[in-house]
Image: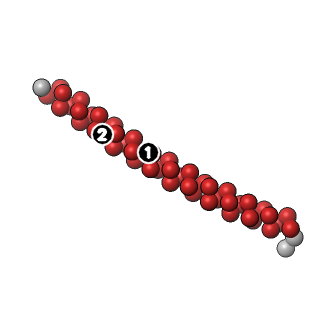
Amino acid sequence: MNELTTYKKFFNEIIETINKAKYKAYKSLNRFHIEQNYEIGSIIVKNQEK
């Protein structure tokens, strides 16, 4: 295996790790937004019922 192939595999592994972390962050943020929107909706409904 030549040096270029070794570096390519090395950088691909780093990029894959970064992409996995980005996906986890997006998923977490999306969950937060869904919960936040649900809470805001609940507040609006309670206010309309008054």
- Whole-percent x, y for residue 27 in the image: 47, 50
Extreme residue toward the bottom, this view = 1
Extreme residue toward the right, this view = 2
Q: Residue at x 45, y 45 (%)?
A: 29
Figure check: 18 above or below 30: below
- Whole-percent x, y for residue 18 in the image: 62, 55
Which residue is tagged 2?
Answer: 38
Q: Residue at x 62, y 60 (%)?
A: 17
Classify mark 2: residues with Cα within 10 Å, few (<14), some (14-19) or many (20+): few
* Distance Cα–Cα, label 1 vs label 2: 12 Å
Figure check: 15 above or below 31: below
Q: Earlier in the sequence, mark 1 or mark 2?
A: 1
Residue 42 occupies which quadrant of the picture? Answer: top left
Q: Residue at x 39, y 41 (%)?
A: 33
Residue 16 occupies which quadrant of the picture? Answer: bottom right
Figure check: 40 above or below 26: above
Classify mark 1: residues with Cα within 10 Å, few (<14), some (14-19) or many (20+): few
Q: Is residue 19 left or right of residue 33?
A: right
Is disc 2 placed on a helix, strand or loop? helix
- Whole-percent x, y for residue 24 in the image: 50, 54
Q: Amino acid at mark 2?
A: Tyr
Q: Residue at x 29, y 34 (%)?
A: 40
Image quarter where the C terminus lies is top left
Is disc 1 placed on a helix, strand or loop? helix
Q: Is residue 27 left or right of residue 34?
A: right
Image quarter where the N terminus lies is bottom right
* Tag of residue 3: none
* Tag of residue 30: 1
